[in-house]
Amino acid sequence: MGIGIGVLMALIFGAGFFARDFIHLRDSVAAAAGDSGYPLLDEVQGLIDRHYLREQPSFTQREYAAIRGMLSSLNDRFTFFIEPPVAASESDALAGTYGGIGVQVKRNEKGEIELYPYKDSPASKAGIVDGDLLRAINGTPLDPNTAQDAIDQMMRGEVKDGSGVKVTVTHATSGHDLTVFIPFAVIDVPSVTWRVLAEDSSIGYMQVSLFTGRTPDELKTAVQDLSAKHVQALVLDLRNNGGGLLQESVEVANEFIGSGPLAFEDAKDGEQAFNAQTDALVTTLPLTVLVNDHTASGAELVAGALQDDQRGILIGQKTYGKGTVQQIYPLTDGSSLHITAAAWLTPKHHALDQVGLQPDIALAPDAQGRDVELGEAVRYLQQKLGSSEATPEVTVTAEAAS
């Protein structure tokens, strides 16, 4: 799979904390004999020390190589070792911070780039509002064929005096063009973003980009806000969500399902059921779930629970198929080890590892990057609402409203 180490971090379920050294190589066989528990490895190192012609890599490099060799024998791509600098940067990524102007970039069905500023972000303070159409960056007109993630990167950068980006947008409300310089700042990226859809004000849209420790609270806030705006249906967008934390994924699934199992975890000590609690947040609104081939791990747990419960239909492409649980073990030098510790199953005991979820409405990705999945979700929900005998209401628990 072409997912890099940075994205793999987003696939991790849970966070275990236990430090341990795997292998201790020594420059001298005499000093190391019997210490590592791998005498043949010590013997090889001794022969290298005595006979190798060239300079050897550092002790740390050899130790890391030995660890990687050991892990490769497991034939498990999700059990892997991360060196200290990468481990530190991935911790920052999971924390959800970067330098930029604080906007979410979306391509609509017409192929236009829409901006959705985060609350209190530099973009919001500069006058950017939901649905503004991006026309130019630093004076250069936007190429409609530019990839969405490349556009996003153009509006990020190092936070320092004078750093920032000049954007030209067409205001969603006035239709007038605005050019403004927006300084970069440290952006705390929310894991949940939401809005009432411009296409239909009766439909609320929520995107969960990663399951972090704050995701359940952010989801409750989103539902509260959409409830206050009297939405009658919901779109839950799990596209490009690589997963995150197991417990938070279960809590999100629980907010939509009032009873029964949400998932099963199969570990060395047996099977554990994750059951829905009675304080589900919203169980009655018509619901669609957007998925694609980068919907993985915790996002598949949520999508699988909703599909098996017939709580909502899946629209998009087959999901990635990661049905295993990883524990993260920090090591003493700041590196970390990720170990596959369990597998999980959907409520109907469907195994998803290397299989994935099949959408109820399958759509090929649009070659021009238009959001055809969201368009199909809107049409489906409009049809559902039109055929409903009564207008459903959002149910918000007392806990969520507090």
Image (spheres, helix red, strand yellow):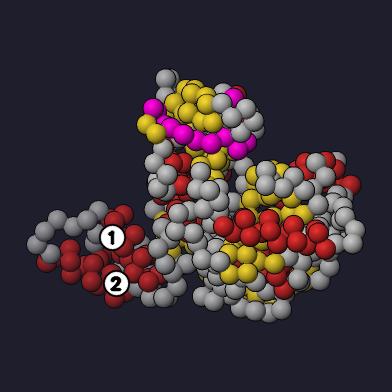
Amino acid identity at mark 1: Arg
Residue 201 is left or right of residue 291, and the answer is right
Q: Residue furthest left?
A: 53
Q: Position of residue 214 (x, y in %)?
A: 67, 46
Q: Which residue is mark 2?
A: 41
Say which element carries label 2.
helix
- Residue occupying image coordinates x 90% and y 58%: 390
33 vs 15, left or right, is left
Q: Quadrant of the C terminus?
A: top right
Q: Secondary structure at mark 1?
A: helix
- Residue on which disc 1 sits: 62
Give the image location of residue 101, x and y in percent: 51, 31
- 217 up-or-down from 320: above or below: above
Of labels 1 and 2, earlier in sequence is: 2
Q: How many discs mark residues in the rendered view?
A: 2
Magenta part of the chain: 127-139
Q: Residue at x 47, y 67 (%)?
A: 78
Picture quadrant of residue 188: top right
| Amino acid carrying mark 2 in the image | Leu
Residue 80 on the magenta span: no
Residue displayed at 58% across by 69% down: 362
Q: Where, by quadrant of the figure, is residue 141 drawn?
A: top left
38 or 338: nearer the viewer:
338
Question: Residue sitting at 49 percent across and 59 percent down?
Answer: 366
Residue 13: assigned label: none
Answer yes or no: is residue 202 visible. Answer: yes
